[in-house]
Amino acid sequence: MAKNEKANSFEMAKKQVDIAGKYLGLDSGTIEKLKNTKRELIVHFPVQMDDGNIKIFTGYRVQHNVARGPAKGGIRYHPNVDLDEVRALSMWMTWKSAVVNIPFGGAKGGVQCNPKEMSLHEIEHLTRRFTWEISLMLGPEQDIPAPDVYTNPQVMAWIMDTFSILKGYSVPGVVTGKPIELGGSLGRFEATGRGVVITSVEALKHLKMPVEGARVAIQGCGNVGGVAATHFDRMGAKVIAISDSQKGILCEKGLDVKKALEYKAKYKCFVCETKDETEITNQELLELKCDVLVPAAIENQITEKNAPRISAKIVAEGANGPTTPEADEILNDQGIFVVPDILANAGGVTVSYFEWVQNLQELIWSEEEVLDRLTRIMQKGFKEVLELSLSKKIPMRTAALALGIGRVAEASRLRGIYP
Ligand code: NAD
């Protein structure tokens, strides 16, 4: 993705505040406050690489808003990470927590790096030094990271360990998405993908379409896309295509999802196994005729260029910011039902909240309990957004933004301005 396209993520996030702010009748001062982040830290730090050379990396932690609770948001390792991207992602975290009514604010972090070209040892060193650099912002009461693109439970374990060493005692509640052995919650790893499936099922029900046999195409097969594919498959839907950053595979009869993901894990790319399967590009995948399209990779994938050719009935946004505002209008005009990112992928922050609660209270919930609570919260979030969308005749995205931004604006109003 080109640099200038990424800078648009923050512009896009600010534009969304303008739209929802206008709809809610917020005053210009409040809108301005919500469009700005609260705290931003940029760090440049050295890591000794395996060949003995020292490399300098740039990392970011941004807290957008803490009116409703501690800042919460993932950490991303990707070559395209920059301040504007992290700002946008932190803002979306604020709205997302508010849409599902979780008592968190929004934050995000990232390091500009290419983890695919780094050894595990180098990633560990980068993680520990980055944690140290941003540790003044972190803590269970302040700011709690989680996994995002190209970070995982092991990275969270290193963050927890480094932060705990700095404190002199174990602080499991400083991160979520940890391994279960370190206080991670059962069901957290699957939470975002499951949330995408739960809200997609609600959307199918609303459109009176059956889940059984529904044709699903998924861009991205990481934590979100891979888990979503598995659960769509288990529910009887037909996953016809899935991709990674290089390419995808298509099978009109429905993929053997388990096998496809096993091959991807083994060979680091998708492999066509039968004559029914063909290779496709990510662009082709997005334009497939299907019932549910799940963009679950990165931002700015559905743009004004390809939006006129999107032929899904439902777009359930597993990724953050996959659709540009221009494309959004086109999808709307085409009557495509959009489950917006701040609702569709809120399952992650929801179970992160459960993990944090369990850590603070030293509790362990069963997977059934976690899934049951997750399902109820996601269904309630979907219902509230849908009702607002139908009663006010506004698109689902505007309804979700209005719900989330409205809650944050009200919390800010009640707290007032210090001094
Ligand atoms: P991941 O690193 O586990 O997987 C990312 C996937 O996207 C991989 O399959 C990768 O090959 C693919 N990908 C990367 N660049 C691509 C490109 N240019 N084109 C097509 N595919 C590409 O990351 P994840 O945790 O699954 O996150 C995916 C998206 O979901 C991100 O937008 C993230 O912010 C969002 N999200 C994640 C969580 C979570 O709990 N992990 C929660 C909410 C939202």
Image: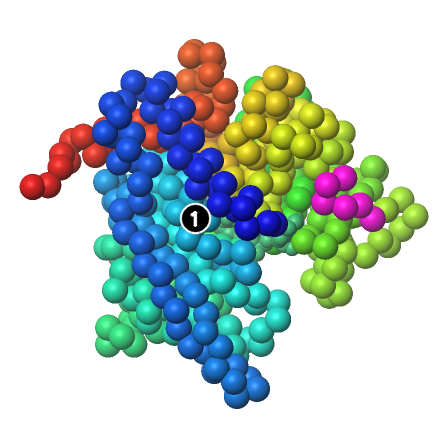
Q: Toward which corner of the image does residue 296 lie, by quadrant?
A: top right
Q: Which residue is labeled 1 in the image?
A: 84
Kindly identify the residue that appears in the image at 44 percent across and 41 percent down: 10
Is 392 rendered above or below residue 162?
A: above
In the current view of this chain or complex, which residue is farthest to the right? Answer: 275
In the current view of this chain or complex, which residue is farthest to the bottom? Answer: 52
Kindly identify the residue that appears in the image at 63 percent across and 27 percent down: 314
Kindly identify the residue that appears in the image at 36 percent across and 66 percent down: 43
Residue 372 at least partly seen: no
Is 119 rendered above or below residue 374?
A: below
Is 206 rendered above or below residue 158?
A: above
Residue nearer the viewer, 365 or 215: 215
Image quarter of the C terminus: top left
In the current view of this chain or complex, which residue is farthest to the left? Answer: 419
**Residue 310, horizontal then vertical, whole percent:** 70, 29
Q: Is mark 1 on a helix, strand or loop?
A: helix
**Residue 125, horizontal then vertical, whole percent:** 45, 77
Residue 252 at least partly seen: yes
**Residue 298, horizontal then vertical, whole percent:** 57, 47
- Residue 280 lies within the magenta run: yes
Kindly identify the residue that appears in the image at 23 percent across and 55 percent down: 141
Q: What stretch is highlighted in magenta?
A: 279-284
Q: Toward which corner of the image does residue 60 lie, by quadrant?
A: bottom left
Left or right of 388: which side holds 289? Answer: right
Q: How many marks?
A: 1
Q: What crowding class fits label 1: few (fewer than 14 Cα within 10 Å), some (14-19), or many (20 or more)?
A: some
Q: Is ligand 1 closer than 8 angstroms to the Cβ of mark 1?
A: no
Q: Please, which colouring scheme is shown? A: rainbow
Left or right of 223: which side holds 219? Answer: right
In the image, what residue type sits under mark 1? Asp
- Residue 354 lies within the magenta run: no
**Residue 396, horizontal then vertical, whole percent:** 49, 23
